[in-house]
Structures are given as structure tokens and as C-alpha cells.
Amino acid sequence: MIACTLTACLDGVRARRVEVEADIGGGLPSFSIVGLTDRAVQEARERVRAALRNSGFTFPSHRLTVNLAPAEMRKEGTAFDVAIALAILGSAGQPGLDQRGAAFIGELGLDGSLRPVRGALALTTELAGVGAERLYVPASNAAEAAGCGAPVHGVGSLEELVAHLRGEAAIPAVGPPHRRVVPAGDDVDLSEIHGQTVPKRALEVAAAGGHHVLFMGPPGAGKTMLARALRGLLPDLEAGAAREVTSMHSVAGLLDGVGWLTRPPLRTPHHSISIAGLIGGGSAFSPGELSLAHRGVLVLDELPEFRRDCLEALREPLEEGHLRLSRKGGTRLLPASFILVATANPCPCGRSAETANGDDECVCPPDMVARYQRRISGPLRDRIDLVVQVRSVRIERLGGGAGETSIKARERVVRARQVQRLRQGSGHLNAQLDAAGLKRVCPMEPAAAAEVTNIANRYRLSGRGFHGALRVARSIADLDGTIAISLDQLLEACEYRR
């Protein structure tokens, strides 16, 4: 007798529908799973066998074959356990199992309990999209999976699930997804940063338009604090963005089952990170730091210290907002739309421009300084809209009163983004404008229009650099509440590209 159940598996960061078929035939007792599976799926034989017996069911003593279709797609992970167990019960003739329109995901413990799996939101969203009317997931994944498009039931054990499918016990569907407020433990408030008027202004412009920014200055000037302050200026995630971010972190196994993420992510990888850790991939495919920073902030502290291949891998996501990975299993498209905040010293010793006390001098030879600065290639630097010099703050100014808070600055950022949403449509910030969009949304005052060519020549802007300056000028105008770009706003934008 053949029985079928519906489940799904992860293919990179996406999910794919999988049909589980179980057949009991004649012959010596055996249990085989076919369908291009990895070791974790093969080990499901022992988990499912023990879970069925410890839940009070009889394991078939016949030749048992389980097929995971489509057979040409590689299956990885432990999310198939529950579907395999129910397919076996169905093929063994267990009465009254109502599986019509239902889909199942979850790992089984040896005692029959359901354990959480990574990627539950992506899996359930895919199953709801292919027509599943009821979704059964481990109780720990229920808050995450809610809101996928179909009713979600959180299940504690296999015995409880079978009783529900027989109509003997009810498992209520969970409510709408809980939008979890994540404490901003890694954030720095602007009021904690003394002085630095220009860098803080640049940070606000970057938050308003979604621009990438590079802070350059000596050690101890506050570059890292400025970088960690950016997320506090960003508004909460909207529903669509929250789904994307939550799904990505779920695939990476970084959720704790409480609910959807509501704040933009902040990722701060160390400069020793590998290329796979940054862009994703690996033997067991997992999203990298670029994708985990999607819709949020990626902080690369001491940018020249990162490996050259890691730095050059930033080019595509900085410009396109996504990343293509070509591997043995095919080409995968990963989301990577983030705001990059990088920091760098002017030279290896960090004192070529100035020092904390103004007494010491740079000890680096000129050729060493040149090699150090060339670690950030021209094409990469050209994709960063704001390059800001951070000066050391005098000791006597560190004890001054607190400045403006991040909440006040965030209010201006939110207003500027609302202007962009009305003008350009939802989800399109100024940093994402192409040449045609810039021409449409960047009217200039007569004084700015008359000087634009001279300004571009004076600052030696490339074509990409000129468009970047226009995007920044548009964000400055949105913060200032003006429709046309003034000459002062255009000059300020160009100063950020020095």
C-alpha cells in the first residue's frame, strides 16, 4: 500500500515542495529512503523507527521504501521526519488519518517529540503557496511560521498530532505573527558621541537615503561608535521586510522561536572572515553576512584589513542589492540589500592625518601608506556614496553635555523616507535610483544647474561618482524639506566624495 504526505526542503535560502511516498511490500524486513538524500535524511530511519515505537505505534516488519520526490533535487536536513512517519503510518493502514490539504515539517526526537528546524518560515510560505490548507510545525517554530498564508498548528509530539488527525483531539491554529521588539544592545546613541558634527550629519544622510558610508580617521576618533549608531536612525521594518529578514535568519538558524524580527539587523563580522562566511555557501549551504544584513546595516570595521577577495565580492551587492552564487548545485540568487558602514585608518599606524594629542607623527613610509590605501580598490570606493573624515575630539570636549539623541534624528529620517515613498514608490530609496530615475526626481535650482558641470570637473567625479553625488544631494534635500536641489546641497554632497 502506498501513502503520500506533503513537506518541503530548503534549497539555498529558498524552499521547494517535496512529496513523501511510503510503500510496504513483500520481502525481508528493511527500511530504505531514496531521493538523492544526505546523511541527516538517511539517519531519519532510526529517529522515525524509535519515535513510532515510543509513541505507541507498531513499526511495519516488512520491506519499507520511502521516496522523496522530486528525486533529482538534493534533500538535506531533518525537516522530513514527521512527514516520513505519517506516510509510514498511512501505508501501514492506520485508520482515520485525515491528511487532506495538510503539510508537515519537523524533526522527531526518539521519544516522539517534535523539535524545531531551521527555515520554518520559508518552508511554510512555500507550502502555503503550492496549495497547502493546513500546516503542522513544531511548537517552537509556530510563532515564526504564523502569517505564512495558511493556518499554522504548533505540535508538541507525534502522538498528539496523530490524535488530532483522527479527530480525537484539537490543536488550535496559532494567531498572527508576533512582531518581536529586539533590544538594541549593540546600538550606540548619537548623544553618546561628543562633537563629530559633520560625521553625524553624514550618518543621518546615509540613513535617510540608504547610502553606503566610509569613515576615515585616526584610532580613537569614534569611527566604530559612529558605525554602530546607524541602526538607531533607521525606522522599524515594515511587514514585507520583516518577513524577508525573519526568513533569512531562520534559514541560518539564528532565531529563538519568539516571533518575527521588527528592527533592521546589524551585522559586524571580524576582518578575518572567510569568503564563504561573508557571501554564503559552504558544504551545508548557509547565507553569509551580506544576506544576514539584508534590510539592515553591515559594519566592516578596519576595512583595509579584510581579505582582497572579500572586499571585491562587495561590488555586486553594493550596486545591485543582491548576490549571485554559482556552485555545483546551480546558481542561487541571495538578497543582500543593506547599508554598508565601513571604517578605515589613513595608514597602518593611523596617524598620517592627525593624532589624538597632536604630538606624535606618522612613522609609515610613503610607499607603505600607498599600499595600505590601495587595499580599498578604486571601483569599490566609487560605489560608496559618502567618504567622511573623522577628526579626533579634544579631551576637554568629551565631558560636555549630551547632544541630540538618535530618536530625534530618526524622526527626520522617517519623514525623509516618507517623501521618497510618495515620490518613488514603496521600497525605493534614493540610493537605488538609476540614471533615468535621477533625471526625473532631481530638479535643481538655477544656481545649482548652472554650476553642476564645473562642480563635477572640480571634484573629478566619474560617471558613477556623479550619479552618487546626485543621489546624496537628493537625500540632503529630502532631509531639508526642499523639492529642488540647491547649490549648497549639491556642494555638500560632493564634499562627501572627497
Image: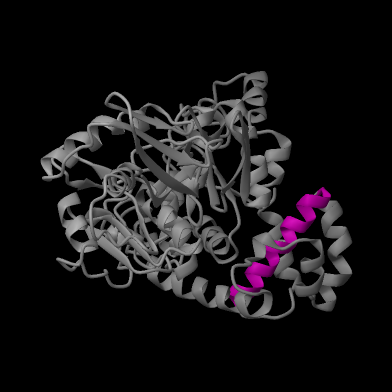
Quadrant in which the N terminus is drawn: top left
For residue 181, what is the image quadrant?
A: bottom left
Residue 413, given in percent of the width and then of the height, sits at 51, 71
Q: Residue at x 43, y 63 (%)?
A: 132
Instruction: Give the camera-side residue of 218 and 469.
Output: 469
Q: Would you say 171 lies left or right of 369 here?
A: left
The residue positioned 28% from the left and 72% from the top of the image is 175
Whether residue 93 is situated above or below residue 349 in the rendered picture = below
Specify whether residue 238 is in view: no
Is 476 covered by the magenta stretch?
Answer: yes
Question: Measured from the top left, where is residue 435 in percent x and y?
Answer: 80, 61
Q: Which residues are magenta?
A: 460-480
Q: Position of residue 48 (x, y in %)?
A: 24, 37
Please determine whether, in this image, residue 111 is positioned above or below residue 466.
above
Query: In the visual, does 407 lie left or right of 318?
Result: left
Please tell me whether residue 216 belongs to the stretch shown in magenta.
no
Q: Is residue 50 above or below residue 466?
A: above
Pinpoint residue 204: horizontal percent, then vertical percent: 52, 63
